[in-house]
Amino acid sequence: MYVAKVTSGRFNAILPSEGITSYTFKSELNWDEDSSTYLYTNLHEITTRSALPDSGTVNLLVLGSAVPADAPDVTTSETVLALNETNRTVDLKVTVEGNDFASLFLSGGTGWESIKFYSDASFTAAKEIDLVNGNGATPVEFWARGEYKEDTAFDSPNLSIILKNASGTVVATHEVDLVDDATAANFVNDLTISRGENDNFSEGEYRLAIVLKNDGSAMTEFKLTATAPSGWYLAFTDPTATEIGLDYTAKVRGNTEMTVFVKLVNMGSETELPDKFDVTITVTGKKAVTADDITLVEEDGSTKVGNVVTMPIEMTKVQLELGNGNASGPNTFMSAGELPTIVWLLIVISILSVVLILWLGIKRGVFSRRK
């Protein structure tokens, strides 16, 4: 067994060849970010000696996601007491638990037209408060009565209650979820699927963006699947590129959008970009999704049948001509570009400065010959 240290995503290894019929590569990678640990693993076997080059690069695709982070110091939960969808009003009871606060100040997120907080369920004006006292030993409860804005989704992140400590630091944000209490007939599906503009690539690896937009009433799930082109690994990643899987289900809340990426990794032997391939996106929501609920961008060439969208992905191919510096292909430009106006202005000022110095020198006789 050969153990290699990974640096910047790469490792070098000198492997024996005499009497070897197969090679097994096992990858176990950890990454810590924002109090979370991400674990990525891969087990890849090469069963024929000829499939492994004498020298060069063999790429491996590792899959994984975040290990749940430790519970926050302050947690919140809610009970929906009343919901009037005609007037867009809601009564809530919110419970706060934790040991990291002595007092908390409350405010509403941008999804509220108005919201007030109370110390008990009577909702009388005299009981309105901005401060919740707690000693961390027992849960603290408060009540809220709010009117949410028109076109605000029942699970919009903006439909929130913000809890700050005495120094103004946000210690918790409670996001109200009215989906289970809302009437199913009042739900609206308004979805848009398009190719993103944030494609990027590095050596042997491409990330192709797909934008999932939800202007509907509640969270919608988009499940993405695809078949890997020959000679390439294919996976999907979340917007932060921390979750990597052979398929991916994006949970997009109402009034939000998410960019997910199709990740292509060269196995190490392919030199040509893959031909066009399809990504299948199956859409489900609180209310059944139909083709009429989904908007596609015509230029993408996508099609839809019921709640299933097929999006063709075509790689941008660029041809370079060695020796003369020419290049051809989509989004390839051979012009040298234009200089910004400020650069021309600085050039003119520099020339005028030189002329002024010469003129002053001549006027003062600096350049005249003394007798």
Image: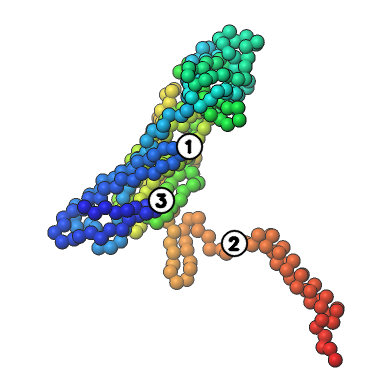
- Asked if disc 2 and disc 1 are in contact, CB closer than 8 Å, the reply is no
Q: Position of residue 347 (x, y in %)?
A: 70, 67
Give the residue number, with chain letter if any, for mark 3: 206
Q: Earlier in the sequence, mark 1 or mark 3?
A: 3
Give the residue number, with chain letter if any, for mark 2: 337
Left or right? Give the position of 205 relative to 137: left
Left or right? Give the position of 164 relative to 297: right
Mark 3 surroundings within 10 Å by alpha-carbon count, few (fewer than 14), some (14 through 19), many (20 or more): some
Q: What's the residue at 62%, 11% (across, down)?
A: 127
Give the numbered dot on residue 286. none
Q: Label 3's element?
A: strand
Mark 1 surroundings within 10 Å by alpha-carbon count, few (fewer than 14), some (14 through 19), many (20 or more): some
Q: How many marks?
A: 3
Where's the C terminus, which quadrant?
A: bottom right
Q: Label 2's element?
A: loop
Q: Position of residue 144 (x, y in %)?
A: 57, 16
Q: Position of residue 318 (x, y in %)?
A: 44, 59
Task: Quote the CA–CA distance across marks 3 and 2.
Answer: 27 Å
Q: Position of residue 138 (x, y in %)?
A: 48, 17
Task: Quote the CA–CA distance across marks 2 and 1.
Answer: 34 Å
> Quick check: can you spot residue 325?
yes
